[in-house]
Image (cartoon, rainbow, N blue to C red):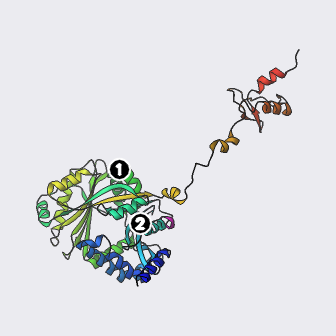
Amino acid sequence: MAARMKMNSLISQNLSVVIRPAQYRDLDGIERLTNESFAALTPQGESDGMKQMQWLRRWYGLLKFLSWFPNPLKYRFFAYVAEQGRVLRGMVQVSPFNRTRSTWRVDQVLLERGCDRLGIGSQLLRHCFESILEARTWILEVNINDTDALALYRRNGFQRLAEITYWDIMPELLADLAQSEPDLPNLLPVSNADAQLLYQLDTASMPPLVRQVFDRQTCDFKTGLFEGLADAVKQWLNKTEVVSGYVFEPQRKAAIGYFQIKLDRQGKEPHVATLTIHPAYTWLYPELLSQLARIAQDFPQQSLRLASADYLPEGEEYLEQIGASRIEHTLIMSRSVWHKVRESKFVSLEGIQLPEVLQGLQPARKPIPGGMSWGQQGKRSLPDRRLHNNVKNNTSKDSVAFFRNHGSVEASGQVESDVDQEQPRG
């Protein structure tokens, strides 16, 4: 019996891993991998995984149909699986991060326990890098305590970009914040006409490296007709409501603050907010948070969750000051596609002798400043045979400089001095 189990393990190890797009028959394997993931170790992560699988089983047919033609939901579930001997070993799910699809995001990587997780995970990631040619940059977000995931991503070229902290504001604290009247005289609703202002605010609120990786454009802050209808249907199904606004500075004609809050009308899930404030107007943090708290008072009492980045320390300081609770600390990592140049093929320079390679490019005579001749058409120098002999005699000593004379390339250097020496006497 032990010999048979050992033989089966050896056979499974010798089978090659096949990377292919995910299909409907893979949902059972994906659910098994979801239950074994790191997020399933916490009650909240297990609940989120079960909801995600229920949603995927319900809408998989529609998502598969929508993936055949361009639409906002084309990449809603875009995944590859690793199969070895008809057994699902892993899955990677990716999606575009911006409208131009120059930056892609690794949404999640699920790997089976007991297998070569680094090897199979690397194969899944590299298959995405090689298959999605329009992606110039890849980003992901990982919990700082997930050491296995950090090892996998660092092995495949991902580097630290920024740190994100997630906060939870309890309902009692929200009620206290809602008592103060926010000083926001120029608070306006968001529309597609304000996309340029929101793009400028997003650009000013992050460092150059993060801005280059995210590569957002004005179109990323606009909502199309089909996308707006999809959001409306999603809000109706999930019993949620989205409220957004921005603060306009009339003197500079710029947006200096933006918020968006997703409210749960049933009172089962926490409210989720997004907050972006210009670094020169950090006094807006208490004002906008008071505005968010006043909006949340019209809905069932739930906590408010929002995120802050390490490159905006004023926001983190204010959240700590009011007593918000830290619930998660994550790391945003990025990878450029130029890593493929070094990963595709290793070239050793030990066997390359540069003098031998550049021997044919070395000039034969040493150039002399001012040795270039721009004579007129009727003025000639020595015959070609005599000039060739002079160059041949000095090849081993000096280099050769080339110049263009009447459409032909000739050699020039110390030829004039040689000509003076070989002129007949008298």
| Callout count | 2
Q: Residue furthest top?
A: 426
Badge 2 or badge 1: first in the primary sequence: 2
Q: Residues within 10 Å of mark 1 (few under 14, many from 20)?
A: few
Q: Quadrant of the C terminus?
A: top right
Q: Quadrant of residue 319?
A: bottom left
The x and y percentages for residue 320 are 17, 55
Specify whether 408 is left or right of 217. right
Specify whether 49 is left or right of 265. right
The residue under the point 67% across, 43% down is 356
User: Does the stretch in magenta take in 218?
Assistant: no
Q: Quadrant of residue 334?
A: bottom left
Residue holding disc 1: 207
Q: Which residue range is magenta in the image?
A: 129-136
The residue under the point 41% across, 66% down is 118
The disc at residue 118 is: 2
Specify whether 181 is left or right of 425. left
